[in-house]
Amino acid sequence: SQQGEEDPQALSIQEGENATMNCSYKTSINNLQWYRQNSGRGLVHLILIRSNEREKHSGRLRVTLDTSKKSSSLLITASRAADTASYFCATDRSANTGNQFYFGTGTSLTVIP
Amino acid sequence: KAGVTQTPRYLIKTRGQQVTLSCSPISGHRSVSWYQQTPGQGLQFLFEYFSETQRNKGNFPGRFSGRQFSNSRSEMNVSTLELGDSALYLCASSSGQRGISGQFFGPGTRLTVL
């Protein structure tokens, strides 16, 4: 079963604007990851944040993690048309013994040129 | 390094048949995971293999099985196909060490069951 939910389900913005999407999850985690998926293709790993980290940056991406609220957010700054894709968060539960990730439902982002 | 490759990319089968999907991980990666993606259920974890052993298993019926070879290549088999098995099947590889890096996904195999 899925671990969590992304919010919003769909987001449409103008090029140059910032996009924020949120992820909530249910159990204790070891780490949380964000992935991007272009239509019908494989997922691309964007960023990993560990449970003892609160914020992480990678280029135009900023991820925050609040373990007390069991939530994370992904901010894409200065968006581009090429950022149009679905974005998923994936959690690695603390109880896991290996690589077993639970994906959220995804946010579909459309960046209008 | 070459990325994760999956074959075939597209497959059409009929109910009751069986199918085998193949995944070649990134060189040096020992962990291979399989996921099923459908519009209704999203991304669901099937199983993970590490050094030829199944290390984790999701909540799928026994019709779904897999294996991993000594070169880390993995196969997934679905027997007695049902219409609901139509999905994008994604394979992901990683070093196997938790929390070090994310998983690297292949392009997927699109399975259609008629």
Image (tube, coloured by chain):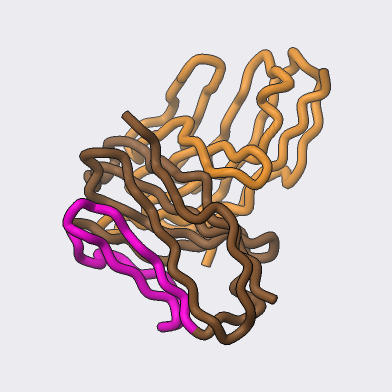
Chain colours: A orange, B brown
Q: Quadrant of residue B94?
A: top left
Residue B40 vs residue A76, the one in the foreground: B40
Expressed as whole percent of the image width and height from the top left, the position of residue B36 reads: 53, 62
Disc tally is 0
Q: For this view, does B97 lie left or right of residue A36? A: left
In magenta, the rendered stretch is B52-79
Q: Quadrant of residue B76?
A: bottom left
Residue at 25% x, 64% y is B55
Residue at 71% x, 41% y is A108
Q: For this view, does B31 lie left or right of residue A89? A: left
Residue A62 vs residue B34, the one in the foreground: B34
Please determine whether, in this image, residue B96 is positioned above or below residue A63.
Answer: below
Q: Quadrant of the C terminus of chain B?
A: bottom right
Residue A5 vs residue A44, the one in the foreground: A44
The reply to whether the magenta stretch includes residue B59 is yes
Expressed as whole percent of the image width and height from the top left, the position of residue A4 reads: 56, 55
Q: Quadrant of the N terminus of chain B?
A: top left
Residue B82 vs residue B45, the one in the foreground: B82
The reply to whether the magenta stretch includes residue B40 is no
Determine if residue A69 is in view.
Answer: no
